Image (tube, rainbow, N blue to C red):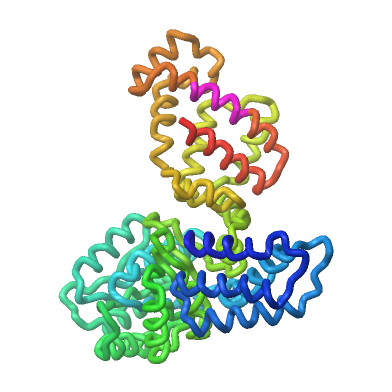
Amino acid sequence: MFENLIDRLESSFKILKGEGKITEINVAETLKDVRKALLDADVSYKIAKTFCDDVKKIALGQDVLKAVKPSQMMVKIVHDELTRLMGSEATDINIKGEPGIVLVAGLQGSGKTTFSGKLALNCRTKRGRKVLLVAGDVYRPAAIDQLKVLGEQIGVEVYTEEGSKDPVSIARNAVAKARREGYSLVIVDTAGRLAVDEEMMKEIAAIKEAVNPTETLFVVDSMTGQDAVETAKAFNDRLNFDGVVLTKLDGDTRGGAALSIRAVVNKPIKFISAGEKMEALDVFHPKRIADRILGMGDVVTLVEKAQEQFDEEEAKKLQKKLIKDQFTLADFYDQIQQIKKMGNIKDLASMLPGVGKALRDVDIDNSAFKGVEAIILSMTPFERNNPHVINGSRRRRIAEGSGTTIVEVNRLLKQFEDTRKVMKVMAGGGAKNKAMGAMRAMQGMRRR
C-alpha cells in the first residue's frame, strides 16, 4: 500500500538529517520534495500545494526541542497534516433503522458487488445484523450471479427478481420483504457504467428516493487516482452520499485517491478493502494510514485482527499450555490456521514498523505454509502431541508421506522448538504480544 509514496517521503526527510535546526531554506527544500512525492502519487496540484503551505507554516512556527531532531519534527508535522487531510477520525456507517438500508453506488469495475458481500459479512458477524443483500444491477447477469455466490459463501440471503429490469421496484420490494421478515439491514448493490452518464445518475437517484437509505456509500477503485476523485465529485453532486469506500488497495495504488477525496467532496472515507477474501474489509483510520505512509507500521490494526481470530477462551487454554511447556505440534497447526484467517501474510507483516520496506521485494503468501501443513498432517495424532518421540525412522516416514525431505522435516521440528520458546515468553502478555509472537512464528516459517 502506497509503496512509492512511502519511499519518496522518506527520501524527502533525509534533506533535514544532520541539520541543527529548522530554517526557511531547509524546510523549503524538504517540502519541494514532498510536493513532488504527492504529485507523483496522483494528488492534485492544488491539494499538494495547500498541504505543503500548511506544513511550512506550522514548521516555521515550531519551537524545536533540543531532544528532537529537525527531521523528526518534520515527520511529526507531516504525519499530523496527512491525518487531518484524510479526515482525522474514523467515521462509522449509519445502519440504524427498521431496517437500516445501505445503498452502494459506483462505476462498473470499482468492486461494488464484492464490497457489498464484504459489508454484509462484516455486519452479520461483527454487528449481529440479519442482512438481506439486494441484486440491483439488472444489466449484468454476471453481477447477479456473483452476488448469489457471495451470499451463499457468507451465509446471507440475496434478493433477486428474475426477468425484472426495474431496479427501483426491486429495491423497494426488497425493503418491504425485509420489514415483513425481520431483517435488520438491507444492502442494495446497484448497476455501474464504464463512465458517469445521465441515465445512471437518474437511476441511482430514483433508487435512493424510493428506499430512503440510512447510508449511501460511493465505492471507488483506488488505483484510478485523480480519476477516482473526479468521479466521486460527480456522484456527490447528484447523490450527496455519506461516505467513500476505497477498494483494491492491495494493487499498484499510488495513494492519490485516499489523500484527495476527503478534501474535494468533504465526505469521510469509511472503509478500505484489499484482497478478494470476504474478511478483507477494514474501517478507515486516517491516523493509522498516515502511520503506514510514513513507514511507521500499523500495530493497532494488526492487534485488532489478532483479537478477531483468537478466541479468548482458547487463548487462555493455550496460555496455560505454553506456561506448562505443553505446546504441541497439533496446537502449532491450529495457530497457523488462525494466522491464515487474519489475511495475507505479507500485508500483516508490513504492519510492523520497519518490516514493510524489508519485505517489499520478497514474495510471501499463505501458500508458504503448505509444506509445513503437509509435514504436520503426515504425522500421527500421537506424534503431533508428543513431538519428542519423532526419531529417525519416524522422520523418514513423515518425509515420504508429505512429499518432502528429511532435512525439511528436521528444519520444521527445529523451528517448532524455537517458536515454542518465543511463544512461551509471550504467554504472559496481551493481544499485542500475541500478534508479535505470531509474526515471529511467520518469519520462521518463511525461512523454509
333 w.r.t. 114: above or below: above
Q: Is residue 97 visible?
A: no
Q: Quick one: 134 or 58, which is closer to the camera?
A: 58
In the rendered structure, the answer to whether residue 82 lies left or right of residue 197 reads right
Say which residue appears at 64% left-offset and 69% top-offset. 79
Q: Does 190 sit above or below residue 235?
A: above
Q: At 43% from the left edge and 63% from the top edge, which residue is drawn? A: 249
Q: Main secondary structure of the magenta part?
A: helix
Name the one closer to the observer, 11 or 218.
11
Q: Which residues are magenta?
A: 411-420
Residue drawn at point x = 51 percent, y = 72 percent: 36
Residue 108 is situated, as x and y percent measured from the top left of the image, at: 28, 74
Is 414 one of the magenta-colored residues?
yes
Quadrant housing residue 414: top right
User: Can residue 432 be seen from the camera position used here?
Assistant: yes
Q: Quadrant of residue 107?
A: bottom left
* Residue 187: x %, y % from top left: 39, 73
Q: Measured from the top left, where is residue 37 in percent x and y? A: 51, 69
Q: Residue at x 54, y 27 (%)?
A: 415
